[in-house]
Amino acid sequence: MRYWDASALVALCVAETNTSAVRRLARAGIVTWAVSAVEIASAIERRTREGSLTDAERAAARAALGELAAAWTEIAALGPVRERAMRLVATHALRVADAMQLGAALVAVSDRPVGHDFVCADVRLGNAAAREGFRLLPEA
């Protein structure tokens, strides 16, 4: 199983330095938290407001997000994800959204992360996922 954090999924919607690497990884399928689409939409809109995306690029990014979200598998079990996130914020220096992402990943693998991948572009979250036992991708 390959779990995807929103930070890595953004690169499938907007050109970033790691876009090529994450595109190759996406061929194996995407599992993510149910709120990832909102996180990605927020990143797209922020970049548009800041002027780094044109209106046409914004539209293309939102369309790409729609296509991805229609095909990925979402972890939507709020109670179990929240339970794991409560432990994660006590164990790692994570923000709430990151703890929920990692909690969703743990739910996805039934709390057995060894042998499973965590695709992430956020250093702090990636480090926490690795400490939990996931293999971090893309590899440096």
Image: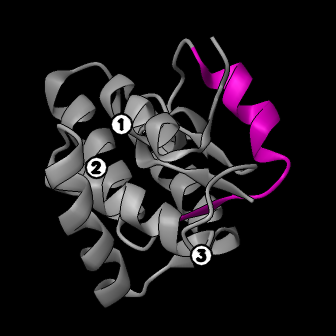
How far apart are labels 1 and 2 at the CA level?
A: 6 Å
Residue 2, above or below 122: below
Q: Look at label 2 and name its amino acid.
A: Asp
**Mark 1–mark 2 CB contact (< 8 Å):** yes
Q: Look at label 3 and name its amino acid.
A: Ser
Q: Position of residue 139 (x, y in %)?
A: 67, 19
How many residues crowd around disc 1 within 10 Å: few (fewer than 14), some, or many (20 or more)? many
Q: Earlier in the sequence, mark 1 or mark 2?
A: 2
Q: Earlier in the sequence, mark 2 or mark 3?
A: 2
Q: Position of residue 74 (x, y in %)?
A: 55, 75
Q: Position of residue 13 (x, y in %)?
A: 54, 40
Q: Quadrant of the C terminus?
A: top right
The residue labelled by disc 2 is 98
Q: Nearer the viewer, residue 66 or 10?
A: 10
Q: Position of residue 115 (x, y in %)?
A: 76, 49
Question: Which stretch appears magenta?
Answer: 18-32
Q: Is residue 127 magenta?
A: no
User: Residue 125: which disc?
Assistant: 1
Which image quadrant for residue 54?
A: top left
Q: How is the image coloured?
A: one colour
Q: Nearer the viewer, residue 115 or 11?
A: 115
**Dot in front, 2 or 3:** 3
Q: Look at label 1 and name its amino acid.
A: Leu
Looking at the rendered structure, the secondary structure element under dot 3 is loop
Looking at the rendered structure, the secondary structure element under dot 2 is helix
How many residues crowd around disc 3 within 10 Å: few (fewer than 14), some, or many (20 or more)? few
99 vs 125, left or right, is left
Residue drawn where x is 47% and y is 48% of the image: 5
Q: Nearer the viewer, residue 108 or 38?
A: 108
How many residues crowd around disc 2 within 10 Å: few (fewer than 14), some, or many (20 or more)? many
